[in-house]
Amino acid sequence: MSRPLLGNVTPSAAQDCARRIAAAFAAYNAAFRAITRRAPERFDARDWKGSQHDMVERIELYDHFVERSVAELRGLLGERALERRLWREIRTEFADRVATLADAEFPKTYFSSVSRRLFGTIGVAPDIEFVATDLDPLANATSPLVTHTYPIHGSLRLLIEELLGDLHFRTPWRDLDGSIRQVANEVRVHLERLGALSAVTRIEVIRTVFYRMSRAYVVGRMVGPGLCIPLVLALRNAGGGLGIDAVMMSGADVSVVFSVSRSYFHADLDRVDEAVAFLRSLLPHKPVSELFTMLGRAKQGKTERYREIMRHLQGTEEQFVHAVGDKGLVMVCFTLPSLEVVFKVIRDRFAYPKNVRREEVLAKYHLVYTHDRAGRLVDAQEFRRLRLPRRLFAPQLLQELREETAGTVREDGEDLVFDHLYIERRLIPLNLYLRATSGETATQAVRDYGQCIRDLAHTNIFPGDLLPKNFGVTRHGRVIFYDYDELCRVTDCHFRDLPAPRSFEDEMSAEPWFYVGEADVFPETFINFMAFDETQRETLLRTHADIFTAEFWRQVQQRLSAGAVLEVLPYPVGPVRLASSA
């Protein structure tokens, strides 16, 4: 039975639009997977520059296709492009068309992106989009993920031999027997330590290998009655053959590998929802939104993040308050104490001494989004036209938003509408962390602060503002940078040695007595502004003295300019591995 006519719109027009949007998503998804499928070739060829290019190309793919769909529909529909009755019919037709697809929530999210961009939707429009709160991306993940299963019949070594033998790379193993022994020994020791050696009955491994830059990861779990223990193998191709770089079997280690402070994986999965369900068995405390994001489905991760927040807000009377830490000159930062995220809104005006423009801040956040975050830059999800209940904002915060962000935030009835904001994982500011801790815990944080600066340098990032208040500490004790308004590329800086004073007057002068260019940086002065106590200062200089020299930064510049890829790995095999292009 055909649907009734809607004014002068026929069902065939709605069907045509639904078909076009579905075809556009299919084309996007095919392009996404085509880029992803290059990863094994990049790994075998040791083409790390190509891996970097693929990472950026794949990230930018979604917006490219959405913009193309919007332009196509505007041209096709003309004056009817914003006719809501038509779009209600298109939505119905589209839902029928994608209902049986794998990961059916993905095309629905794509449809909503097209609809929202076309209409400039504020908040949600349930009649012409698929509301995120109604989309459960794991609802259809009922069938088990296709895995290789290896029953344990007594010989752990033979099991690992079979597992590694099932991996298909063009690159041969450098020492297969040695790799088998390494994995088998580490697994045995770990299970014995847990008292679970006899309890584990099988190992299950996702058939798809996960790639990130110069490393390949085999993701699995060790299973027994009431047991589920992670097993993640990191493989490297060092030029002389394949080798095992790390064997990870703790939730904390695997969580770091799948951290949102790192670049997205390239893994060609037929069912992403099933892979996320598998990963949740290894990382039960990791938000689903972050797992989708880490598999490269950033838009779906963002949709799920919105759904997590909206679900949390239902029925709560808890209020949004200022995020802990020093007041930012560029951003108003707020949070809900029971939510592990921070909301960041750019101020209308920046107080002295900030001299960046809003457009520059936006560009820096985009740079981080497309860059290798190396486990040291938190992923910031960008939201537009977000609607939140005004009653949930503490008076002091509400007043600051009215006074400082009127160009971005406005009141609409009982709500606040945020035309633009970022949402990040909440961290403990390093300066507050050091005040609340002491002894080895504080010492380790200071050491990792220095390592964070070093790691960022090796990925061509100079934080700009190195004050501890701009760094945060994760629940795993890692130090991460999160204030991006002065961030830039190392290769764009001019690192200089501090000139010696010519006289006593020069030495006592509050202002430089020498010329300072816009891109000039004097690393020797960094330590003067860090507000560490004497013990912390000594620790930092003992372990990372070279980062306070211009020579360190110039050497990094030279290596980066020569085409070297310096990858910072998410497991302890040394601070940096040089992955030269093949």
Image (tube, rainbow, N blue to C red):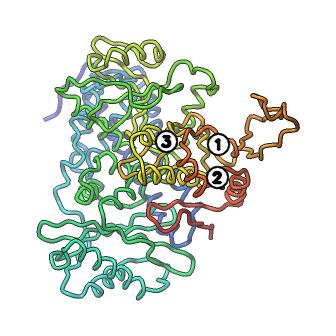
Residue visible at 29% across and 60% down in the picture: 251
Q: Residue at x 23, y 39 (%)?
A: 135
Q: In the rendered image of this protein, does residue 132 appear above or below residue 221?
A: above
Name the residue beneath numbered marker 2: 547
Q: Is residue 149 visible in the rendered structure shown here? A: yes
SS class of the residue under badge 2?
helix
Seen from the viewer's position, the closer of residues 243 and 6 is 243
Residue at image point 30% right, 27% down: 87
Identify the residue position indicated by label 3 in the image: 471
Label placed on residue 526: 1
Residue type (three-letter) at the residue carrying disc 1: Phe
In what element is the residue under mark 1? helix
> What x and y, as percent, mark residue 390?
30, 17
Q: Circles 2 and 1: CB distance less than 8 Å?
A: yes
Q: Amino acid at mark 2?
A: Ile
Amino acid type indicated by mark 3: Phe
| Residue mark closest to the camera, 1 vs 3 | 1
Q: Nearer the viewer, residue 498 or 298?
A: 498
